[in-house]
Amino acid sequence: MTKEDIVRLLRQKQSDRSLRSFAGEIGCSASYLSDIYLGHREPGPKIAAFLGLEKRTTVKTTYEKPVKRRWR
C-alpha cells in the first residue's frame, strides 16, 4: 500500500469532519495529519493502527559481480 493509498483512506474516514476533530479521534495533532496529507511526513504507527494496518519496511538487496581490474 502506498502513502497515497493511506491518504485516500484517511480522507474517506475523515468525511466531512474538521481536520482537528478527526486528528483528535486518531490521537495525533492536526498539524501532523495535515503534513501527512501534504506529503511532508510519513504516516506513523498511530495512523497505521487507526486504519487497521501494520507498517512494514521492505529492503531489496542486489548483488553486483566484482569488476576485475588489470594492473599495469
Image (spheres, grey):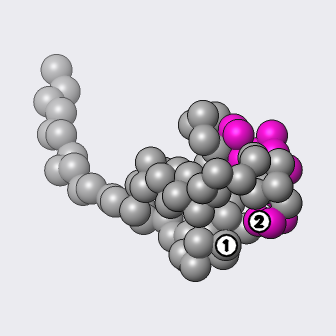
* Amino acid marked by disc 1: Phe
The residue tagged 1 is 50
User: Which residue is outermost to the top?
Assistant: 72
Position above or below: 38 against 16: above
Answer with left or right where residue 1 lies relative to residue 27: left
- Residue under the image location 33 percent in, 59 percent down: 61
Whether residue 31 is in magenta: the answer is: yes
Q: Secondary structure at mark 1?
A: helix
For badge 2, the amino acid type reads Ile
Q: Is residue 70 left or right of residue 63?
A: left
Image quarter of residue 22: bottom right
Asked if the residues shown at circle 2 and circle 1 are in contact, with their CB atoms under 8 angstroms apart, the answer is yes
Q: Earlier in the sequence, mark 2 or mark 1?
A: 2
Cα separation, mark 2 vs mark 1, equals 6 Å
Q: Where does residue 18 sit, x and y in percent of width and height? A: 75, 47
Q: Secondary structure at mark 2?
A: helix
State whether residue 38 is above or below residue 14: above
**Magenta-drawn stretch, dominant element (helix, strand or loop):** helix
The answer to whether residue 15 is seen in the rendering is yes
> Circle 2 sits on which residue?
26
Q: Nearer the viewer, residue 66 or 38?
A: 38
Rendered residue at 15%/40% (across/down): 68
Using the image, determine if residue 64 lies above or below residue 27: above
The percent coordinates of residue 46 (x first, y second) are 73, 67
Crowd tier of the residue under label 1, counting other residues whose Cα lies within 10 Å: few below 14, some 14–19, many 20 or above: few
Q: Is residue 45 visible?
A: no
Residue for point 22% across, 50% down: 64
The magenta span reads 25-35
Q: 64 and 61: which one is in front?
A: 61
* Residue displayed at 47% across by 53% down: 8
Looking at the rendering, in which quadrant would you find the C terminus? Answer: top left
Q: The N terminus appears in which quarter of the rendering?
A: bottom left
